[in-house]
Amino acid sequence: AVPLVIAISTTIGARNGLLVRDRRGLEEARTLDAVVFDKTGTLTLGEHRVIDTVAAEGVEADEALQLAAAVQRDSEHAIARALLASAEERGLTVPRTQNFQAIPGHGVQATVDHREMRVGGPALLRKFEIEPDAALREAAERFGESGQTATYLVEGRRALAVFALADAIREESYEAVKRLHDEGIEVVMLTGDSEAVAHAVAKKLGIDTVFAQVLPEQKAEKIKELQSQGKRVAMVGDGVNDAPALVTADVGIAIGAGTDVAVEAGDVVLVRSDPRDVPRIVALSRASYRKMV
Ligand code: ADP
Ligand code: MG
């Protein structure tokens, strides 16, 4: 015979668009104090678009886009896909590169025509001690304040351009946050993106606690930090970067449309990729397991 709890978990999952990979996740959801959401691809669609380019003196915007797209050619990051799509839309040819390398949580690098180029966010600038000129710095600040991710093109130690990458918040995220708050559950955002972008998005969603500029290997540490405060924590994520945090959390919830690595790390998978299914999991768990054990 199938033990009762397993049968219940499987039935609840199937009826509600959830794939329950570990029933303990579903059982424990009723005890949660905090839910941590990854930003990009989880609360947002993770479908970036290039909406502005500011180039340094003597650099053409199109040339910058062409180079950035080239460096990003072999990257799977959403920002990479956006730069390539934008170059394509503008009819630019994207040159071949050598020595492509990803720098996780920072960006990517490659050689274009013997030029050593990198593309990435503020963390990349810090890592290589690059100071962008005033025009680029001001543009990046402006992008951040409006929730757009500033992505730099760098040659050696010089920033050649900064691009604004916009990523839309999932409509369903607003309600997901509100319902969790209504249940007295703390909502936290965890992201590798800058403080400015993270806070702009968090403010729109009504999220009070934000961990920004978190490197991939630090995401699980943040979960442990919350747990050490005595909290029972769920992590919701979609990316390769999120897998260790999904495993560390008391309940790991993966976005169905996310990467295989994340899906395999989750206890529960949101088949519809709808963040509102997180408060539903809590409600289902409370209703189903209250009288048991
Ligand atoms: P997240 O998915 O939470 O934004 P990541 O760890 O993937 O976090 O990236 C953190 C930051 O590093 C991004 O916001 C971006 O600024 C930069 N970054 C990482 N990879 C790339 C890339 N391929 N191209 C441009 N920027 C990147
Ligand atoms: Mg993500």
Image (tube, rainbow, N blue to C red):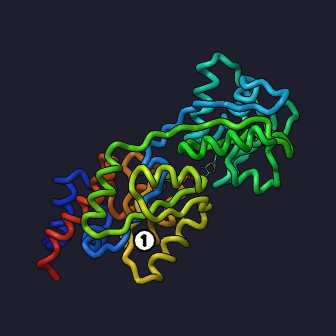
Q: Amino acid at mark 1?
A: Ala
Q: Residue 112: image x %, image y %?
A: 81, 33
Q: Quadrant of residue 61?
A: top right
Whether residue 113 is visible: yes
Answer with the quarter of the image where residue 207 lies: bottom left
Give the camera-side residue of 186 and 69: 186
Q: Position of residue 24 (x, y in %)?
A: 29, 72
User: Against 11, is 78 above or below?
Assistant: above
Say if 23 sits above or below 159 in the image. Answer: below
Q: Is residue 61 above or below residue 268?
A: above
Residue position marked by numbered label 1 in the rendering: 249
Residue 290 position within the rendered picture, expressed as x and y whole percent measured from the top left: 15, 76
Give me the residue at 57% from left, 46% from top: 145
**Residue 75 falls left or right of residue 207:** right
Q: State which quarter of the image contains the C terminus.
A: bottom left
- Asked which secondary structure carries label 1, the reply is loop
In terms of depth relative to the viewer, which is nearer, 96 or 55? 55
Nearest the viewer among 216 and 12 is: 216
Tell me, yes or no, if residue 23 can be seen here: no
The quadrant of the image that shows the N terminus is bottom left
